[in-house]
Image (cartoon, coloured by chain):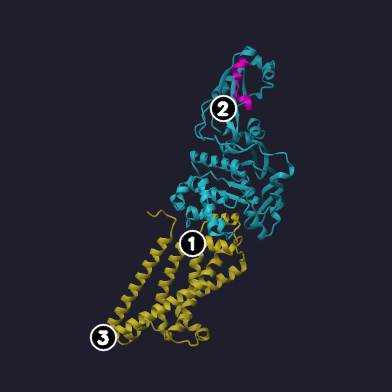
Chain colours: A yellow, B cyan
Amino acid sequence: MSPELLSLIYDATLETLYMVAAATLIGTAIGLPLGIFLATSGKGELFEAVSVNRILGLVVNATRSTPFIILVVAIIPLTRLIAGTSIGTTAAIVPLSIAAAPFIARIVEAAVREVDQGLVEASLAMGATPFQIVRKVLIPEALPGLVLGITLAVVSLLSNSAMVGAVGGGGLGDLGIRYGYQRFMPEVMLVVVIVLIALTQALQSLGESVARRVNRRVRQH
Amino acid sequence: MPQAVAAAPSPALPLSIARPSEPERESGGDAAIVLDRVSHSFAQRGTGAAIPALKDINLRIARGEIYGIIGRSGAGKSTLIRTINGLERPSTGDVIVGGITINRLNARDLRAERRKIGMIFQHFNLLSSRTAFDNIALPLELLNLPRAVIRAKALALLDLVGLADKQNRYPAELSGGQKQRVGIARALATDPQVLLSDEATSALDPETTASILALLARVNAELGVTIMLITHEMAVIKDVCHSVGVMEAGSMIEEGPVQQVFAHPRTDTAKSFIGSLPGRDLPVAVVKQAIDDPNTALLRLTLTGEAAGQPIITRLGRELGIDITLLGGQIDTIGGAPFALLYISIPAEAWHSGRLSHALAGEGATAELISHVS
């Protein structure tokens, strides 16, 4: 394989990592509080707000049920508003983040709901405020689940990022389609797939090892 | 709790702990906890119909007292204890702790009051992500105290509950009894005046239960903390409580000093709880034989306080000139004082003449004729 091709693959890998990292950060920044709210705003819960909970739930479901490639195209005006352009790697971060946030929110919600209600009750009995309970109890106790969930989100972002070539997003997926498919260079396609598999594998292992490290629910000897 | 029948020493409960001086039960304004006509209902799922959980409960717990509430599951004792720190707000009535009406506080003031009321739980409710030390530190962190203060306090509490060497262990690495010790230390971190115990020993084996109860008694005696506990085990009441309330179907059906309720239970529920203690019941065959024989009277002799330690049986036999057959019984410590319950049979004539009752008067003992197996 020519040095030019290798350099293309290298750049595409960096673009993918850039998009995935940025979208993970933004998606988590939105999805984490949203998920915690979804998990604590039901009837009789810490931040009881049943109707808001229901509306946010609907929005989350609507976003999650829209196929990613349609979401990318559908929100082009919004992307232009936020990123200044609707084309390119940075612009692609907008739809990636918007797709990731509700996904992360549901994962966070599930992880937080797993926390024993007895701990919430014990914290209330100690005189903790709802925000203290979130910060000192719910997040630390849900941490192993949160880490695994965000790992899941990262891997799904990796696969979504392959689709943003449709709006000139660049990255490995785009490279695979343009060189591997449209220019009939199967070796490029193969390398792209291998790099993606390696990335997925590495991220998954990293996530699992961090989750294990923060999990104190089992003896660690 | 395995209590041997008759005079065998009680093996499981090393309760040689100092007891507090009798709580000041009379002083009206000095009650730690007062419940004034407390009723509560839950809305039924779906229909919204009100399901009563507490019915017109009146209660007065003196400062420094260990007050036990016993009842079967569903009797309302959990709901009751949760009203004390405002986890449950009663539908009607007032809950007054340390002079403050808990159910009328706003959220902010309620949080401040809750710091004066510690609570321990059946399933410990420790944070799995925190070590024993950090679990105890949590209530202090919530107050944003300086690190050094938190550290000193948490270490002292670890010492108090006997876990100084386990401070860096996570709950998953501790036994049930050790977890409850951490729970107790955590509940005491903010120097509460009142400690609520929600079935704190129900998930523990008998020996661990005994050691946790001993710790609670020590906390009560040394720190003067008023303890309200709920349980479904009469042995817990017997071993540490000064007073007891019996709950059934949301009502407090019987109440009083533990000695009194044990010696003279009025309700069937109280009788059955007391009867559930080992050594309380005689074999049916023994009772039947005694009842079938018209010439003998089967009696239950209840001796409290001083009397429990006196050689009453032999004295009666000597003074009345009758033969006394000891059929069974139990000698125990209840509410911190000796207590004996003996089943005897005597000639029917001695009972009907009233000579026995006469002789017992003034001894701090009572006798009742048993006509059926209770």
Q: Amino acid at mark 1?
A: Ala
Q: Can residue B314 be found in the magenta stretch? A: yes
Tell me if I can see residue A217 in this picture: yes
Q: Position of residue B212 (x, y in %)?
A: 53, 42
- Say which residue label 2 marks: B331
Chain that bears disc 2: B
Q: Residues within 10 Å of mark 2 (few under 14, many from 20)?
A: many
User: Badges 2 and 3: C-beta atoms under 8 Å apart?
Assistant: no
Q: Is residue B319 above or below residue A2?
A: above
Q: Horizontal placement of B165 versus A194: left or right?
A: right
Q: Can residue B299 be found in the magenta stretch? A: no
Q: Horizontal placement of A30 versus B58: left or right?
A: left
- Could you tell me how far apart the alpha carbons at marks 2 and 3 are, in whole angstroms? 95 Å
- Say which residue label 1 marks: A142
Which quadrant holds residue B111? bottom right
Q: Position of residue A186 (x, y in %)?
A: 28, 82
- Say which residue label 3 marks: A2
Whether marks 3 and 1 lie on the same chain: yes
Tell me if I can see residue B301 in this picture: no
| Helix, strand or loop for disc 1 | helix
Q: Position of residue B274 (x, y in %)?
A: 60, 34
Chain that bears disc 1: A
Q: Residues within 10 Å of mark 1 (few under 14, many from 20)?
A: many
Query: Between residues B175 and A19, which one lies in front from this camera angle?
Result: B175
The quadrant of the picture occupied by the C terminus of chain B is top right
| Helix, strand or loop for disc 2 | strand
Q: Residue at the spot x=45%, y=53% of the render?
A: B168
Residue placed furthest toward the left: A1
Q: Position of residue B367 (x, y in %)?
A: 65, 23
Q: Magenta residues, as a range?
A: B303-317
Q: Amino acid at mark 3?
A: Ser
